[in-house]
Image (cartoon, rainbow, N blue to C red):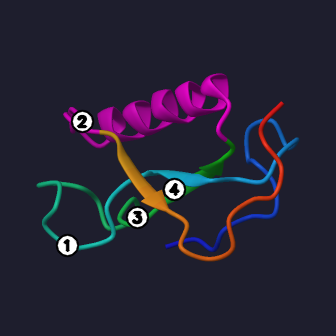
Amino acid sequence: MRPVTDMCEVCGQAPPVVGIGFPAWPGAVPGLPESLRGMCLWVCPARQCDLTVQKRATTAAARAGITLTEIWRHHRFDEPPKESAP
């Protein structure tokens, strides 16, 4: 899995609180290419950033011939962000 970024990968204005993407363990999504396993983008709590990344994940899965039935979230367990989203 990619390391947590310092700022949201969509807006770049607030610390991320969650990674949205694909599960890291094999077999969680049948047919998921290895190149997508564990991949995510780290986003702040802003709704628009969340929706943008959900769309990207859905599109990436569709390119691999997969219809996502669930959006995967990788939660941070390190230090929580000290600022809220814009």
Q: Do the residues labelled 3 and 1 touch (CB within 8 Å)?
A: no
Q: Where is residue 34 in the image (x, y as percent from the top left)?
A: 32, 68
Identify the secondary structure beneath mark 1.
Answer: loop
The residue nearer to you, when weighing 28 against 33, is 28
Q: Main secondary structure of the magenta part?
A: helix
Q: Residue at x 31, y 33 (%)?
A: 62
Residue range (magenta): 45-70
Residue under numbered circle 2: 68
- Vertical relation: 17 (above or below) 24: above
Q: Residue at x 81, y 58 (%)?
A: 82
The amino acid marked with disc number 2 is Leu
Q: Are marks 4 and 1 in contact (CB under 8 Å)?
A: no
Q: Dot 1: few (<14), some (14–19), or many (≥20) neighbours within 10 Å? A: few
Does residue 39 appear to the left or right of 34 in the view shown?
A: right
Residue under numbered circle 1: 26
Q: Position of residue 18 (x, y in %)?
A: 55, 53
Q: Quadrant of residue 68?
A: top left
Residue under numbered circle 3: 35
For the residues marked 4 and 1, what is the alpha-carbon distance in whole angstroms?
15 Å
Q: Position of residue 43 (x, y in %)?
A: 65, 46
Mark 4 or mark 3: name the one nearer the start of the chain.
3
Mark 2 or mark 4: name the one nearer the start of the chain.
4
Q: Which residue is drawn at 40% across and 64% down?
A: 35
Quadrant of the image containing the C terminus: top right
Residue under numbered circle 4: 40
The residue nearer to you, when weighing 47 against 59, is 47
For the residues marked 3 and 1, what is the alpha-carbon distance in whole angstroms?
12 Å
- Vertical relation: 81 (above or below) 21: below
In the rendered image, residue 55 lying in the magenta stretch gets the answer yes
Which one is closest to the eye, mark 3 or mark 2?
2
The residue nearer to you, when weighing 86 against 51, is 86
